């Protein structure tokens, strides 16, 4: 089997006035790079090439090429939709001058529908002779305005000309695909199937890869397929191909408007404007695409690699509810996890509890702190200079929280009496997520201020210069809650619960949970003293907690990859970034159950915590509020 290559037939994003949106186009190319595409097919039918002027087609090709070069992707381009061969040659020579990696000819432009194959071959040779012998070529069985399929004589002409590398096959018949692959043997021309129903069989027959519509609709599945091909895992390949084929009907539903709707929901492009003259999407069609997205999401996480988890105590046995765990591995090999538990969140009997793993086995939970008869919240366990500390919140309502802190000098075996934190910052210190030890020795604590009626969430950071014994307010992280017409507006209450990392001395970054359906980010270049206005990332957020750790030059982020304010808290996964958080890829799935059958409700895996020690990731998270889940991932 050949290496599997992916070339999406890229759509053209438009602004509301119908002009090409090159900012969105760049984000689109970024997305395809992040899922492992080898290149893009620009200025094709998906790009609405028949509805662009020559100048627009050439500029679209030029910009696409520039964006591809940024990622080292190939850019192949078409757009010769002109009727006269002379006009086609003029356009193709101009396209050639841009330096694209290959020029893709359209088979139905080579002859009229009622003209013979001989005329098509003659015109093919005429066009190719007008181009430089160094120019690489492809051909595409475009179905509009009619489909001229590649015949054996046309394929023979391509082989004879010798400049061809690429066929985009749309015949949709596996026997014909096999005949074509056999004819192409030894020619260096790769056949790229555009049909999902025959994809698996075509790959087994020797197809070079996929070039088609569905990469715009479900790119992560093709990334899974590419990985399965690289591993020669036929079973996994078949499972992925079966899903891709099973939802292939969506190609027939008002494409490319439906792809634009989905990409706009993902935050990649800004509108669903088309110029092909088709009616806009109906409400019913949008609901179908919403269901398609949900179906894909559930299937995707079943197919991703899962990491085994442990429950710290029996499901639905230790507490009516437990939540908001944090985790700390200690020097002697034990693992400590602290969380709140009781009747339910906000109940007066809720206290701070700790579980301890010894020799791989979790011991029974023990009460760590209960300072009064009001709810306790969101503990954070951390270690600095051999002292372990737990900081937690006490109070009936969040605006009235008071931070308490306790410490252990013997690895968590014994603890000091909890005491309130310094009076000048009564709710200070880390909230839910761990503090960050900076290169200058300070501890930077993620915090946030929350009010009700109206609900306002404002992220901030505190600092400690005494190892975490006390915390003082340092800086607010600015967010845009005021102007919905400006960039990076956060609809709703705002942002809370930052998770922090330092990329180089003094350069600190925060990702935040928000009410906007997306994770937002802010950056500081002065050790957290000032921050830029938070801006939206491509990462979805369900208005639930996230956490992150930096390991050497990689980031590992735990989240619910679900978009929407108070949306579902399943599945829960780990994503990885190798470029300081610019792009993330899926790394592991921790849990993806949809229903908590025992209690007749949607499953909920929430409030993850992640730390690293000696090349090992330690992760905890809430498991349906009936237990705390633990996962250990050895990166070595």
Image (tube, grey):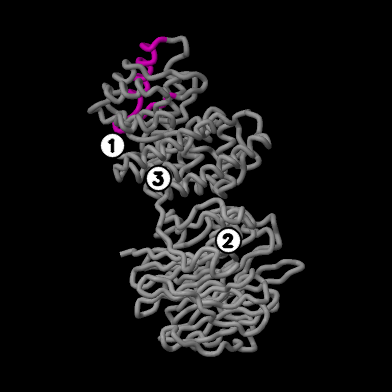
> Dividing the picture into quarters, in which one does residue 157 lie?
top left
Provide the residue span drawn in magenta. 116-141
Q: Is residue 131 magenta?
A: yes
Between residue 503 and residue 427, name the one nearer to us: 427
In the rendering, at what x and y percent does residue 83 appear?
Answer: 49, 19
Tell me the quarter of the image containing the C terminus: bottom left
User: Pointer 3: what residue?
Assistant: 224
Between residue 140 and residue 635, name the one nearer to us: 635
Q: Residue 2 carries which label?
A: 1
Q: Which mark is residue 535?
A: 2
Q: Distance between the residues labelled 1 and 3?
A: 16 Å
Question: With 167 as the anchor, is 352 left or right in this view?
Answer: right
> Dividing the picture into quarters, in which one does residue 550 lie?
bottom left
Rendered view: 331 above or below 52: below
Label 3 SS: helix
| Mark nearer the N terminus (1 vs 2) | 1
Label 1 SS: loop
Q: How crowded is mark 3: few (under 14 residues within 10 Å), some or many (20 or more)?
A: many
Q: How crowded is mark 2: few (under 14 residues within 10 Å), some or many (20 or more)?
A: many
């Amino acid at each position: 089997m050949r290496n599997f290559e992916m070339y999406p037939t890229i759509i053209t994003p438009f602004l509301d006035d119908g002009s090409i949106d090159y900012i969105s186009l760049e984000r689109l190319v970024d997305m395809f790079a992040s899922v492992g595409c080898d290149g893009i097919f620009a200025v094709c039918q998906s790009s609405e090439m028949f509805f662009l002027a020559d100048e627009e087609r050439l500029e679209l090709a030029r910009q696409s090429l520039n964006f591809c070069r940024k990622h080292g992707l190939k850019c192949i381009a078409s757009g010769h939709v002109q009727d006269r061969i002379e006009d086609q040659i003029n356009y193709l020579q101009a396209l050639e001058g841009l330096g694209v990696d290959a020029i893709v000819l359209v088979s139905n432009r080579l002859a009229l529908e009622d003209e013979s194959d001989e005329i098509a071959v003659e015109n093919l040779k005429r066009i190719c002779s007008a181009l430089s012998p160094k120019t690489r070529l492809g051909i595409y069985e475009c179905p509009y305005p009619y489909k001229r399929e590649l015949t054996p004589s046309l394929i023979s002409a391509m082989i004879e000309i010798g400049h061809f590398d690429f066929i985009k096959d749309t015949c949709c018949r596996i026997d014909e695909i096999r005949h074509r692959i056999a004819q192409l043997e030894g020619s260096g021309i790769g056949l790229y199937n555009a049909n999902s129903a025959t994809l698996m069989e075509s790959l087994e027959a020797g197809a070079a890869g996929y070039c088609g519509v569905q990469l715009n609709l479900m790119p992560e599945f093709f990334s899974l397929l590419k990985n399965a091909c690289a591993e020669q895992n036929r079973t996994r390949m078949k499972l992925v191909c079966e899903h891709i084929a099973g939802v292939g009907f969506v190609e027939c539903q008002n494409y490319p408007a439906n792809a634009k709707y989905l990409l706009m929901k993902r935050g990649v492009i800004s509108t669903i404007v088309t110029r092909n003259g088709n009616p806009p999407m109906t409400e019913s069609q949008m609901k179908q695409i919403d269901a398609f997205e949900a179906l894909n999401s559930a299937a995707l996480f079943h197919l991703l690699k899962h990491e085994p988890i442990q429950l710290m105590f029996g499901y639905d046995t230790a507490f009516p509810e437990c939540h908001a765990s944090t985790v700390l591995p200690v020097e002697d090999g034990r693992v400590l996890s602290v969380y709140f538990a009781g009747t339910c969140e906000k109940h007066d009997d809720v206290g701070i509890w700790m579980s301890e793993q010894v020799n791989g086995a979790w011991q029974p939970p023990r009460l760590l702190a209960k300072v009064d008869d009001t709810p306790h919240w969101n503990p954070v366990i951390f270690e600095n200079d051999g002292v372990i500390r737990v900081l937690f919140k006490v109070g009936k309502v969040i605006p009235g929280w008071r931070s308490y802190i306790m410490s252990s000098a013997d690895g968590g075996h014994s603890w000091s009496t909890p005491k309130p934190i310094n009076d000048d910052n009564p709710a200070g210190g880390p909230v839910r997520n761990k503090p960050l030890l900076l290169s200058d020795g300070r501890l930077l604590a993620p915090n946030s201020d929350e009010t009700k009626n109206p609900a306002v969430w404002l992220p901030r950071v505190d600092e400690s210069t005494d190892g975490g014994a006390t915390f003082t307010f340092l800086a607010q992280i600015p967010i845009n809650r005021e102007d919905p017409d400006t960039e990076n507006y956060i609809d709703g209450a705002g942002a809370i619960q930052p998770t922090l990392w330092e990329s180089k001395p003094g350069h600190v970054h925060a990702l935040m949970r928000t009410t906007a359906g997306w994770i937002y980010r802010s950056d500081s270049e002065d050790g957290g003293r000032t921050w830029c206005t938070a801006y939206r990332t491509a990462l979805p957020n369900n208005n639930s907690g996230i956490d992150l750790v930096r390991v050497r030059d990689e980031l590992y982020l735990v989240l619910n990859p679900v978009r929407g304010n108070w949306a579902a808290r399943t599945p829960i996964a780990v994503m990885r970034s190798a470029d300081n958080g610019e792009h993330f890829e899926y790394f592991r799935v921790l849990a993806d159950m949809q229903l908590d059958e025992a209690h007749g409700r949607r499953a909920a895996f929430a409030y993850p915590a992640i730390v690293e020690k000696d090349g090992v990731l330690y992760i905890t998270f809430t498991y349906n509020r009936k237990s705390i889940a633990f996962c250990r991932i050895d990166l070595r």
